Image (cartoon, rainbow, N blue to C red):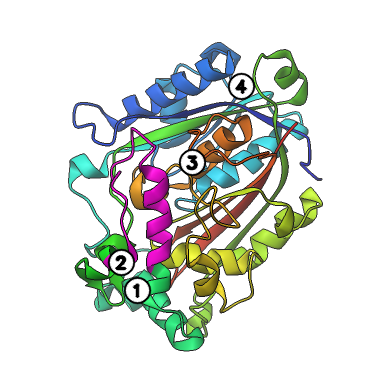
Amino acid sequence: MSIKGMAYIVGAFEHPARKAPDKSVAALHAECAKGALEDAGLTFADVDGYFCAGDAPGGALSMAEYLGLNVRHVDSTEIGGSSYIAHVSHAAQAIAAGKCNVALITMAGRPRSEGRSGVKQKVVGSNVPDAPFELPYGPTAVNEYAMAAMRHMHEYGTTSEQLAWVKVAASHHAQYNPNAMLRNVVTVEDVLESPMIADPLHRLDCCVVSDGGGALVVVKPEIAKSLKRPLIRVMGSGESPKGLNGGKVDLTYSGAVWSGPKAFEEAGITPRDIKYASIYDSFTITVLMQLEDLGFCKKGDGGRFVADGNLISGIGKLPVNTDGGGLNNNHPAGRGGIVKVLEAVRQLREEAHPKVQVENCDIALVHGTGGGLASRHGSATLILERV
């Protein structure tokens, strides 16, 4: 069953807090939900489908009760930071199947207040099958992504200077976002002179650690057309996990090589049709590899594609992460997927800051990689259209 045109995003809200020590994670979820429903012109009573992931305290059952929801459909798919991109697709599928009419998607967390970051070794339960084979080597988020970056450099000649351009573009956009954690414009030299965290990734190659969250409201077409909101139609989606394949793994590509083509095929378009792209940016290498895997350039050409301001709105060929992305704006709970959808919605509604608003932005792509780029991760791709 195709979801093309079967559902619309009518509500979107990004929590303005980047540090929230006085709020519980559940309270952040509730504030995001309230904001998205108000943006849509709907209420909690209208919601009959609820979607959340591993950041939701107690899962869908506890959060549905906490939010006071009376729903007939829930989905707690967990594929890391890409979960919420997949949730939009799942909501559209559920709506198309008649399982619900108004789907609420929430995410929130407070790692900054809790002192968590990607430089500490992962905490994984002993019953996880990969744990005995990997934990003795001390994997962390940053050193796993650094492995992928180093391998890409070895295979294709990608340089640290090219990676730095991803951060430079993000900083150019973030200067216009009053809520962004980092608003100072940086240069390639600034990135290269920042401390090395895990070779070849410098501190400015790494995303911010922030509290906060976001929420989305997805509804059936009849409801969308009855509301006084811009019509943002779901056109295509794709999902795919990628693992280590028993050690026979190529670190130079992500699951986007499978999820991207599925989304483009369902939407009936190609990468050339995309006016704006929200690309998961946990690290600079994440963006570069996903752009290749999604077909915006050939494998190995990502370094040249991102260089010289090509990702900067109004300057480059493909504006990417015009809110500043996870590198500068917000990466709540270490899960940036929902923020990627939110900025795509803003662009399609022409509600982005005038300095970064993409001209005639009618088709946008959202892509996320949740998990570890150099280990197992989930990839989710979403294509949206302004009607």
- Vertical order, 147 against 331 (above or below): below
Residue 111: assigned label? none
Task: State the quadrant of the N terminus.
Answer: top right
Evaluate whether residue 4 shows in this view.
yes
On the image, the x and y values in percent for residue 351 come to: 54, 29
Q: Is residue 169 magenta?
A: yes
Amino acid on which disc 3 is placed = Ile
Amino acid on which disc 4 is placed = Asp
- Mark 2 to mark 1: distance in Å? 6 Å
- Residue found 47% across the figure and 65% down from its top: 308
Q: Which residues are magenta?
A: 164-189
* Residue on which the image places disc 4: 48
Helix, strand, or loop for circle 4?
loop
* Residue on which the image places disc 1: 146
Q: Residue furthest front?
A: 315
- Vertical order, 207 against 362 (above or below): below
Q: Is residue 48 magenta?
A: no
The number of discs equals 4
Q: Earlier in the sequence, mark 3 or mark 2?
A: 2
* Residue on which the image places disc 3: 338
* Residue on which the image places disc 2: 142
| Tag 2–tag 1 contact (CB < 8 Å) | yes
Amino acid on which disc 1 is placed = Ala
Amino acid on which disc 2 is placed = Val
On the image, the x and y values in percent for residue 307 come to: 48, 68
Task: State the quadrant of the C terminus.
Answer: top right
| Tag 3–tag 2 contact (CB < 8 Å) | no
| Tag 4–tag 2 contact (CB < 8 Å) | no
Evaluate whether residue 130 shows in this view.
no
- Residue found 50% across the figure and 23% down from its top: 36
- Mark 3 to mark 4: distance in Å? 20 Å
